[in-house]
Image (spheres, helix red, strand yellow):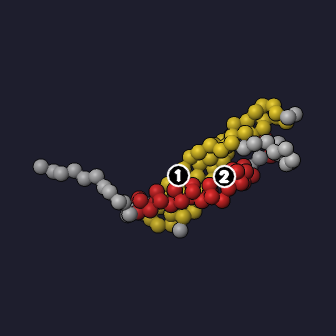
C-alpha cells in the first residue's frame, strides 16, 4: 500500500485582485508516495511528483483570506482543478516509480578485470 502526502503550501499570489489581497493563482505542489514495503536497509520506498497548478479566482465562491488558508484547503483546490483523472495520473506515476524501485527492469553493473 502507498500513502500519498500532498504538500500545497507554496503558492503564487496577486497582491491585489478584485478588491481582495494576496489572491492565490498558482499552487506549487509536491506529492510524495510512501510505500509500506521496506527495502533491505529497512527504509520505506518513496517517490515524488512536483508540479504547478493554476487556480482561478472563482466568481461565485467565497474568498478565503490568505492567513486563513491551510494545506488541506489548498490541496482541495488543486485536486478539484486536476479532477479525478489528473489526481489518478499523479498517484499512478508515483506508484510506478516505487514499483520500479522495488522491481527494477534494468540495472547498471561494472565488469571487473
Left or right: where does residue 79 sit relative to residue 50?
A: right
Reading the image, the residue beneath label 2 is: 82
Q: Does 1 sit above or below residue 107? A: below
Residue 89 occupies which quadrant of the picture? bottom right
From this viewpoint, which residue is outermost toward the left?
A: 113
Please provide percent x and percent y for residue 63: 84, 45
Residue 97 is tagged as none
Query: In the depicted view, which residue is nearer to us: 35 or 106?
Result: 106
Q: Is residue 72 visible?
A: no
Please provide percent x and percent y for residue 105: 35, 60
Q: Are marks 2 and 1 in contact (CB under 8 Å)?
A: no
Left or right: where does residue 7 sit relative to residue 73?
A: left
Residue 59 occupies which quadrant of the picture? top right
From this viewpoint, which residue is outermost toward the front?
A: 85
Mark 1 is surrounded, within 10 Å at the Cα level, by few (under 14), some (14 to 19) or many (20 or more) other residues, namely some
Is label 1 in a helix, a strand or a loop? strand
Q: Looking at the image, how many numbered discs can be counted on the residues? A: 2
Please provide percent x and percent y for residue 44: 47, 61
Q: Is residue 109 visible?
A: yes
- Mark 2 vs mark 1, foreground winner is 2
Query: In the depicted view, which residue is nearer to us: 16 or 60?
Result: 60
- Residue at x 62%, y 43% (from the top left corner): 52
Reading the image, the residue beneath label 1 is: 48
Amino acid at each position: 500500500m502507498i500513502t500519498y502526502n500532498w504538500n500545497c503550501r507554496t503558492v503564487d499570489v496577486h497582491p491585489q485582485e478584485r478588491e481582495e489581497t494576496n489572491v492565490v493563482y498558482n499552487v506549487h505542489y509536491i506529492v510524495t508516495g510512501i510505500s509500506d514495503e521496506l527495502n533491505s536497509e529497512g527504509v520505506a520506498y518513496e517517490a515524488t511528483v512536483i508540479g504547478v497548478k493554476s487556480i482561478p479566482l472563482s466568481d461565485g465562491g467565497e474568498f478565503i483570506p490568505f492567513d486563513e488558508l491551510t494545506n488541506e484547503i489548498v490541496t482541495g483546490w488543486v485536486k478539484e482543478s486536476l479532477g479525478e483523472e489528473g489526481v489518478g495520473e499523479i498517484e499512478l506515476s508515483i506508484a510506478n516509480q516505487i514499483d520500479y524501485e522495488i522491481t527494477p527492469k534494468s540495472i547498471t553493473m561494472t565488469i571487473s578485470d
